[in-house]
Image (cartoon, rainbow, N blue to C red):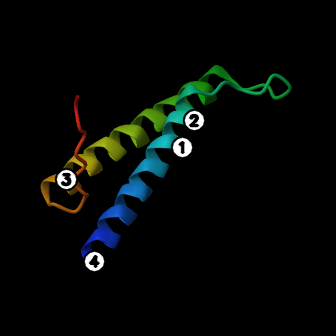
Amino acid sequence: MKKKIIQWGLMTVLGLWGMVSFMVLAGEEAPEVCMTLGDFFLIKALAITSFSGCILCGKWLSKKGLLPEISIQED
């Protein structure tokens, strides 16, 4: 039971991390706040780096068996 709680806790953290990274990556700047082109690209590059880190961390945790097995039933 304790292992399942840890696995689902890690899965939740990974999901939130990936969701926030994707939201920053897909988001646009606010029209009332001017942002330089360099700042815009820096924010997007950091979001891509963060999202890639999330994916790599998820793959590593999955290899170590620290993520729950999710079975999808196909009809």
Q: Which mark is residue 24?
A: 2
Image quadrant occupied by the N terminus: bottom left
If you read the primary sequence from the N terminus, does the residue marked by circle 1 or circle 3 appear first? 1
Residue located farthest toward the front when viewing the structure as drawn? 75
Pick whichever, 15 or 5, lies toward us: 5
Pick whichever, 48 or 68, lies toward us: 68
Q: Relative to residue 26, is residue 35 drawn left or right?
A: right
Q: Nearer the viewer, mark 2 or mark 4?
A: 4
Give the class, few, some or many, for how many residues have Cα within 10 Å of label 1's Cα (few <14, many ≥20).
some
Dot 1 falls on a residue whose secondary structure is helix
Residue located farthest toward the right when viewing the structure as drawn? 32
Q: Nearer the viewer, mark 1 or mark 3?
A: 3
The relative height of residue 68 versus residue 3 in the rendered view (above or below) is: above
The relative height of residue 27 versus residue 72 in the rendered view (above or below) is: above
Q: Are marks 1 and 2 in contact (CB under 8 Å)?
A: yes
Q: Which residue is mark 3?
A: 62
Q: Which mark is residue 20?
A: 1
Circle 1: residue type: Val
Q: Which mark is residue 50?
A: none
Circle 4: residue type: Met
Circle 3: residue type: Ser
Residues under labels 2 and 3: Cα distance?
25 Å
Residue visible at 43% across and 33% down in the picture: 48
